[in-house]
Amino acid sequence: MKGKKLLKKLITALNSHYFAKSVACCYKYDEDFKKYVGMLPEKFVYRMRTLPDGGAVTITKSGDKINVSSGKEIIVKPDVDVCFKNIEGAFSFYTGEKSFSKCLAQSAFEIYGDVSGMMTVSHMFDIVASYILSKYWLKKHNRALLPRTAGANKVRFFTLFGRF
Amino acid sequence: MSMFNFSCDVKILCGDHALDNLPYELRERDCARPLFISDERSYRLGFAKEVRRAMDNDTIEFGATYFRISERATPKDCDDIVNLYKAHGCDGIIALGGENVVQCAKVAKLMILQGVGDFVYFNHKTDMDAEKISYRDLPLFILPSDIPCGIEGTDRAMIFDEKNNIFYNFESVLTRASAVILDVRLTDIMPAKAMATAGLGALAMGMKGFVDNADNPLALAYATGAIHTVINELLPAMRHNSDADYRISIYSSIIYAGIAYYMIKESLLRDMANELSIKTGRSALQILSIIFPTYYKEKMNGERVFKSVLMPLVGEAAYAKSNSKSRDVVAMDTLKEFWAKVVALADIPSRLQDTGVEQSDFVKLADAVITRYRGNDPHNNFTTIVKLLEEAF
Amino acid sequence: MKDSGFYYEFYNPTEVSAGVGCLNEAVKKLPSLGLHNAFFICDDIEKSSAVDLVRAAINSVKVRTGAVYVNSEKVVSLNSLREMRDVYRLNNCDCIVVAGNYRVINTAKTLRMLLSAQVVRFEDVKGINVARKKINVPLVVIPTSVGISSALTGSVSVKDDYGAVFGCVSSLCAPDYCIIDPSLTSVFDAPTTIAGAMESFAINIEEFVSKQAIIHTKCMNLIAIREIRDNLFKVVNDPMDEQAVLGLQKAGLIAGICYSCASAGIAHAMADALSNLTGRDNYICTGIVFEACLRYNLDAVEKDYAQALYYIIGDDRYASTPEEDLGRTLIDTSAKMIKELFEENGLPTRLSQIGIDEESLDKAVEETMKSYAIVTNPKNVTKDDVYRILRSVM
């Protein structure tokens, strides 16, 4: 079972990396996503940690661009810092089994900082899920497929092979 | 002046991966060296391993472990736990198992907080409120791995000292758990018989909690929820006993029904169940599943609350259509019908004679119950108890 | 059956004592909670005799009121909190006792969190589940109004030094002890009481249909809805009917307890946003948007509405309503009740009456989307949905 937990950690790390890329990709192609980013304050920094000492996805808004990175490093103090309580919570989020809002409703993480900024990010993540997860997977886990303004395959392709 | 009190400062974590939150909950309460206690059954079935796995890669280590709690909780178990706790400098308790483990853990917590080193201290103090109030808290996590007994979320604990034939009934906030964690991984497939007994026990506690907490909306809601769950999910839980969702539903209904049931200060039913449990060696839930219909029929007096209990039994639509004058009778019939269906399906004992009690024991039993009973209802007297026992026989 | 991945946490750390005239009996428990020198917070010491009653009661059990602080801010500011913290420490207080409406209770909850977590800056506890208990600071809450649903929740709102309002959720915000005595609501203000009761009603319905509702919270909500049905009009007709006021307070209490598990829904999210924008009380804003929100969620939770309807209209009407109309009847009945009571008491029923126009609509939508409460709404809420709902009540 130790191996199973390790495997889950590896999958989570890998998924979080591609998740970060897909956020950047959605910003490039999806109009609704851009609107939500517009709602965030200038120089807004959002960080999502897998575990207190684990890897993290950091999203930074600067001007009309967003920078997304995955890894442990922190350059500035995040406005919103989300930390999962345990690896299971992170695993079910990054594999698309649970939406961000469901994780939030089930108290799957601690949130440091401004809660309202986090809700905007939650809507952004729902859009990302509508692109990168298949319809079957969304339906299986009772998740909504939001309207998309760009092609899903295009976003998936650039998530895998694009550079952001 | 009518006033109600409600207090249930116990966090309930229930559902998928609930166990994985244990390290977080421990950290929240600054608990770095918990004492892990369990019984042989839970250890053999691998549940203790599941708990260890959930703690994997975490900074928390068990201060000590103790997996030898007897099948029926004894004062010696409590003493052992307290000694181990002190010897290893622990700062919390994780209790995994059934009724025996829960009772021991709760009493051990009380002993540690009160600075009692030996259970002998309680000798001949059979009804104990907290004597010294302690502001220190001792995190206690209850992880039911067997069918819960109903006291998990309450301020109660009971220990029977077989050697000296003394029943200790503790009622104190110091026995309160910090959290109860119900996870599918800690439960095993239950035979239909065990599920039926537990479900009917929960229904009995829920019904009693409903009737006696009519003025307390919070306890009433706990009881209503438990009745509703048992009525709707017990039969499927027995038929599909490998389905963990049903199992967890019934288990959680026992915990919630227990909260409402133990909120009643004095109860003849509870005293009878405890006394019969000591006599027969069966759990109080099992006894409740046998004597409750008789008790309920005897106590039903046409008051409004006996009519409104029909609501959780049949649902809003059927309730609205029923005759408002005879709802108590319909409720009794519905209850009887449901009881008979479950008893027939699981083939469980439905009379006291099936449990090994003999008619010649009734006087002694009734005497013990009336000594224990502290309520002031004049109808709850020796004759009533004997009559109830005879009818349930 | 439940969704896969179903999980819930239910926690109600507050001990409750409630009853008509129970104050003097209930306060006897305070010394056993370790209270000796109380920091007493109230909303309006000059006008309210309830405050005097509470002070006399706690003094009678040998709990001193080491310091008294009056606060009537709608949302407590960081400045006030700093001031209160200094007064608390200067007077060596060991607990907080608060008597008043939901605003002052919110203030006391925030102060308790700061003192208990022993933090210097509020930023250190900003967020969800961030504050950790370092020392024990018992908090006793004695509400003196009907709208008490927020008194028992673990969430608070704070205004920072720049005037921005932000929320914070922690179990340290929830009180240790709550005493509900309707005889303390002596200064009867009909519009406030009615709007407060309607807010409890709305929150209970939203919690009942919430995505995170469990059977036990649902049962609590139904009991609360029945209490409102039984007592609201009694209070309207006879404001001195203390048993009826207690019924309404019980409903508010239940809404607060269930909030930790079930949260609320879109109406609560909108009311929060509108309240912050207009400065009007939450319960007035809830009354305005509630019907539209009920209609919005109808297709997702029609069965739940049908079940809740029984507790509003009772036996005869329920039995004679066709099954397919039950959900819709709940909306119509609730809407009629709110409209009549609000109009009779001169309360606003349209957004335009509280100063929301087309220009401020965008801001209202934006703020609603940022609210934590929409997470558990039975339908996934989009910006367009919020626009549509708000436009329909302009």
Image (tube, rainbow, N blue to C red):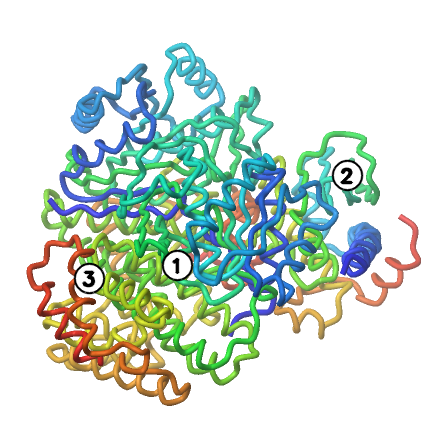
The residue singled out by tag 3 in the image is: B369
Residues under numbered marks 2 and 1 in contact, where contact means CB atoms less than 8 Å apart: no
- SS for callout 2: strand
Q: Is residue A159 left or right of residue B252?
A: right
Q: Nearer the viewer, residue C338 or A158?
A: A158
Question: Disc 3 versus disc 2: distance between alpha carbons?
Answer: 70 Å
Callout 3 crowding tier (Cα within 10 Å): few <14, some 14–19, many ≥20: many
Task: Using the image, determine if residue B89 lies above or below residue C224.
Answer: above
Q: Is residue C189 left or right of residue A2?
A: left
Relative image position of residue A131 (x, y in whole percent): 76, 63
Q: Nearer the viewer, mark 3 or mark 2?
A: 3
The residue singled out by tag 1 in the image is: C217
The residue singled out by tag 2 in the image is: A60
* Outermost residue, bottom side: B344
Question: Disc 2 versus disc 1: distance between alpha carbons?
Answer: 39 Å
Q: What residue type is disc 2 on?
A: Thr
Query: In percent of the image, x 12 and y 75: which residue is there?
Result: B387
- SS for callout 1: helix
Q: Nearer the viewer, mark 1 or mark 3?
A: 3
Question: Can residue B222 be spotted in the picture?
Answer: yes
Give the quarter of the image for residue B200: bottom left
Relative image position of residue C198 (x, y in whole percent): 29, 51
